[in-house]
Amino acid sequence: MCIRDRSNKVALISGGARGIGEYTARLFLKEGASVIIGDKDISRCKKTINELQKEGYDCSFVALDVSKESDWIDAISHIESNYQKLDILINNAGIYNTIPIEQTHLDDFNNIISVNLTGLFLGTKHSIPILRKAGGGSIVNMSSTAGLVGNSGSGAYGASKGGVRSFTKYTAVQHAMENIRANSIHPGPIETDMLAEKLSNIESRSASESKIPMGRIGTIKEVAMAILFLASDESSYITGAELVVDGGLTAR
């Protein structure tokens, strides 16, 4: 599978300094794309970019707090000045908590929404003009199985990811005729820093695995490969879709 057709593709990945975002960036670079990593962890971004540039890859980073519109404006300006186009937007940045609804303070709820949903809206809004100018492109939005079904975890997180699912469909419908596709990825439990504390507990890990028909936790590679597919020309007739990467968790 290759995201490069006859010319190099340019991809912006939010939350690209670690985890799924970093793995996806490396995967895209190996496939021939130019990659801009956006993250608010500047030191981690610089470290990752320096490593990749030493390997000969075409990549750069932008300071990006996805909840700040000014950061998105600066990111797009960086892309226009240095790459002149954008083909792929990966809205990957996100945060998570497990606070039950009754114990959730308004500030906690708003913080989750501002990063997971508002940040995604801002990224999409400011990327569409440059995607349009390039003749179209692919937007891949990071949702979750929590955006598909309810569970005993955070209501704020579930609300944000449900919003991602719905917003993706609106984006797909409104921009289909401009050859701008939008799809959402819905991972189940994945071996990431976000779930590291929970999965380090043997009992919690076993409880999670027992609910999954495939009997194991997913890997960041498996999610990144799904992102690659939706970003690639192989998925050219897919828009407004939900790609679930959960080992069968939501199939029960």
Image (tube, rainbow, N blue to C red):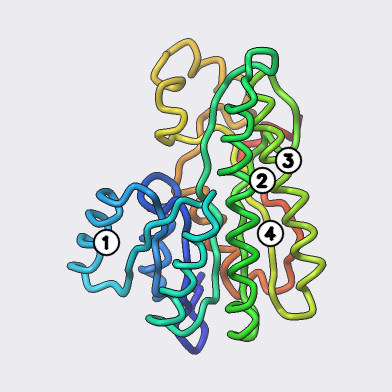
Location of the C terminus by quadrant is: top right
Q: Amino acid at mark 2?
A: Val
Secondary structure found at label 3: helix
Q: Is 113 rendered above or below residue 27?
A: above
Spatial separation of the CA atoms under disc 4 and disc 1? 27 Å
Residue indicated by mark 1: 49
Please name the residue shown 32% across and 68% down the image. Answer: 60
Secondary structure found at label 2: strand
Q: Amino acid at mark 3?
A: Gly
Please name the residue shown 55% across and 58% down the image. Answer: 69
The residue mark sitting in front, 4 or 3, is 3
* Residue 66, horizontal then vertical, whole percent: 51, 52
Residue indicated by mark 2: 244
Residue indicated by mark 4: 183
Task: Please identify the residue farthest to the bottom as the structure is shown.
Answer: 6
Secondary structure found at label 1: helix
Whether tag 1 and tag 2 are in contact, CB under 8 A, the answer is no
**Of the numbered discs in the image, which one, if any, rests on residue 162?**
3
Please name the residue shown 58% across and 51% down the image. Answer: 119
Q: Is 233 rendered above or below residue 14?
A: below
Q: Amino acid at mark 4?
A: Asn
Count the marks.
4
Going from N to C along the chain, the mark reached first, 2 or 4, is: 4
Q: Nearer the viewer, residue 78 or 248?
A: 78
Going from N to C along the chain, the mark reached first, 1 or 2, is: 1
Going from N to C along the chain, the mark reached first, 3 or 1, is: 1
Q: Amino acid at mark 1?
A: Ile
Please name the residue shown 78% across and 57% down the image. Answer: 169
Secondary structure found at label 4: strand
* Residue 153, horizontal then vertical, whole percent: 64, 21
